[in-house]
Image (cartoon, coloured by chain):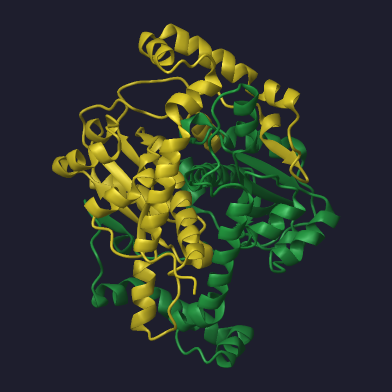
Chain colours: A yellow, B green
Amino acid sequence: MQNKIFEGIASHRSIRKYKDQEVSDDIIHQIAETAMNASSSGNMQSYSIIVTKDKKLRKKLYPLHFKQSMVLDAPVLITFCADFNRMRKWVRQNRAPMNFDNYMSFMIASIDATLVAQNFALLAESVGLGICFMGTTLANAHEIGRVLNCPANVVPVVGFSLGYPDEAPEVRKRLPLSGVIHQEKYQDYTPEQVGEIYQERETLGMKRYSEVPELKKMMKKHRATNLAEVYTKVKYTRESHITYSQNVLTYLSEQNFMNHS
Amino acid sequence: MQNKIFEGIASHRSIRKYKDQEVSDDIIHQIAETAMNASSSGNMQSYSIIVTKDKKLRKKLYPLHFKQSMVLDAPVLITFCADFNRMRKWVRQNRAPMNFDNYMSFMIASIDATLVAQNFALLAESVGLGICFMGTTLANAHEIGRVLNCPANVVPVVGFSLGYPDEAPEVRKRLPLSGVIHQEKYQDYTPEQVGEIYQERETLGMKRYSEVPELKKMMKKHRATNLAEVYTKVKYTRESHITYSQNVLTYLSEQNFMNHS
């Protein structure tokens, strides 16, 4: 099958280098307005979209996004927040019973926010802009939320840099479809299947890590000898993930999303 | 701005009535293959896509999706799961240190799954199919996951019915953009702003509830006198959300996503 939607989605790649060129509010607003037609649980639209252009503010956010260069180099940072603050204010003003201060509400809102974010990304790419999602938005939500003045019942979930691309990287290779799709029910993987699914990725990954001097050095330093070790010894350690997990769960309590009694 | 991506996203509406017409595996696979080009944290693709067509299985899932008619009436049900089972098997086979059995990993995976789901939805709509997201996928993940044989480290997060539309509903009205977008930082809402943001929705909502006899009856039964009360007395009660929250959090522990010590 081939149409403009297939072409758009198939050509996505993350952009980490940007031209020194502003993105107009008019373009951002047109994109956001259309993106908001994403499915939304009960049509509640339990999200907010924060558009940050101010350089001082981006400098404050830069270390909180673990010094990813895009925070400074792209002209715009977009942060999609799970948001039940607005809805709860409306409910209170109408003297209706309160809700949405629990974990289920956080998840409803974070799914809503993520659906809108993906629409926003595709729309931006369709008019020549580039984006790069940053997982730090959630990993460090408690600090980012404070800088962005998020009140109770608002939590940053996903975010990306936005601007005009100054690079043209290739589309990343993905796992074979047969490794990701399941017919009828989940079909668990045999060791042989796991080997096959990740084979091409291992080959490509190890090639890259042996060719780029910094990556080669990093592997040596951490005594990583295969791609799986690069993932869990270098990029995603259990220790760092436990810290992020605890921070996020504590922040969810602080932001009034954990009242279950 | 106007292009095919804008047109596609702007024309989305949930489809709840479907033709009695199969969707071929070939179409589903082409959509899934392209959808997988969504951004993915560390390119880990920590999700699985379960395609359920079997009528017996959909009958089992029907009550678990709180008897939403689409589960039986649409020919296909797609369930997107947060999945670190596959990745952990690969990590273990490569004798790398283990990870991804914590809350941060669940969130990374559930964001990945949601981004792919939105791509899938847009691609499906671009070839004449219709979808309807079902929030029950997560609200009742523990029961749906059991029926779909999800092993540890796999949790259903988002899902939708899929098929050829047998209705042509209008696009739903959304909140005004000014109520959702924030410049630079989060700008909290005054009571006046909240009133303005929800005004049109209240008017349209109350009109609908006064015109459709079943809805009118339901409002009377629950003594709901305004739209906010419909939301939190009828559709989304605090009690139901607390139950879902507890179920999801317990299931995350059972599925090995809550190891933080």
**Viewer can see residue A150:** yes
Q: Position of residue B149 (x, y in %)?
A: 75, 48
Quadrant of the image occupied by residue A48: bottom left
Horizontal relation, residue B186 to residue A211: left or right: left
Name the one closer to the observer, B53 or B110. B110
Q: Position of residue A206 (x, y in %)?
A: 52, 13
Horizontal relation, residue B80 to residue A16: left or right: right
Q: Considering the image in quadrants, where does the N terminus of chain A appear? A: top right
Q: Residue at x 43, y 62 (%)?
A: A45
Q: Is residue B144 above or below residue A131?
A: below
Quadrant of the image occupied by residue A259: bottom left
Name the one closer to the observer, A149 or A33. A149
Q: Residue at x 21, y 36 (%)?
A: A22
How many numbered marks does the figure carry?
Answer: 0
Name the one closer to the observer, B130 or B234. B234
Q: Is residue B60 above or below residue B89?
A: below
As drawn, the residue found furthest toward the front would be B261
Q: Is residue B164 above or below residue B244?
A: above
Q: Position of residue A31 (x, y in %)?
A: 36, 47
Q: Is residue A74 above or below residue A117?
A: above
**Viewer can see residue A2:** no
Horizontal relation, residue A169 to residue B43: left or right: left
Name the one closer to the observer, B66 or B68. B66
As drawn, the residue found furthest toward the right would be B56
Q: Residue at x 52, y 16 (%)?
A: A205
Q: Position of residue B151 (x, y in %)?
A: 70, 44
